[in-house]
Amino acid sequence: MAEVPLSAFTKLNPSTFSGSYIHEDPYTFVDEVSWIYRGLGCSPTRMVQFVAFRLRDVARGWYKTMLLARPARSLLLAWDEFVELFLVHFLPQSVRDSRAREFETLVQTKQMSVME
């Protein structure tokens, strides 16, 4: 598999994620870059390298710290592992559980469309 250049990723203008703002949704960020990952067909470790360029502020600090905490001879971080670690850190289980409960109790009224 030929390596996909960084320019192919940046040309698609993916979002950035800082982890500094309450309105940022880590799941939306991961979902967006996952679509790009599948579309580009790059390797799982290459995608993590690409996404690292889109992290800012707190998220970039977390990424650097997380890499330093890995064993010295560990394999390169693959996409699935990155997503798991990223969501655990920026979207805690308590928030995921709360969103799941909220979703389960949604009720559609006659005046609401399916999109609402």
Image (tube, rainbow, N blue to C red):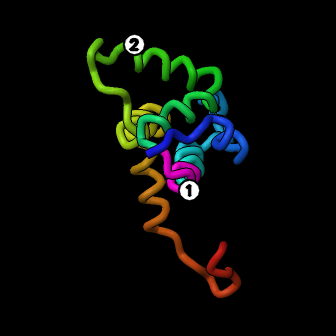
Instruction: Judge by depth and name the residue closer to the eye, 103 or 19.
Output: 19
**Residue furthest out toward the bottom:** 110
According to the picture, the residue beneath numbered tag 1 turns out to be 39
Q: Amino acid at mark 1?
A: Gly
Residue type marked 2: Leu
Going by the picture, which residue comes out furthest to the front? 2
The residue lying toward the viewer, choosing from 43 and 110, is 43
First along the sequence among labels 2 and 1? 1
In the rendered image, residue 3, in percent from the top left (x then y), is placed at: 51, 39
User: Which quarter of the image is occupied by the C terminus?
Assistant: bottom right
Q: Position of residue 1 (x, y in %)?
A: 43, 46
Residue 91 is situated, as x and y percent measured from the top left of the image, at 47, 39
Secondary element at image label 2: helix
Residue 93 visible from this viewpoint: no
**Residue 41 among those drawn in magenta:** yes
User: Which residue occupies 48% across, 64% down?
Assistant: 103
How much space separates mark 2 and mark 1, taking CA atoms?
A: 30 Å
Boundaries of the magenta span: 36-42
Residue designated by label 2: 68
* Horizontal relation, residue 1 to residue 13: left or right: left
Query: Foreground mark, 2 or 1?
Result: 1
Magenta span: predominant SS is helix
Residue 39: percent from left, percent from top: 56, 56
Nearer-the-camera pick, 103 or 70: 70
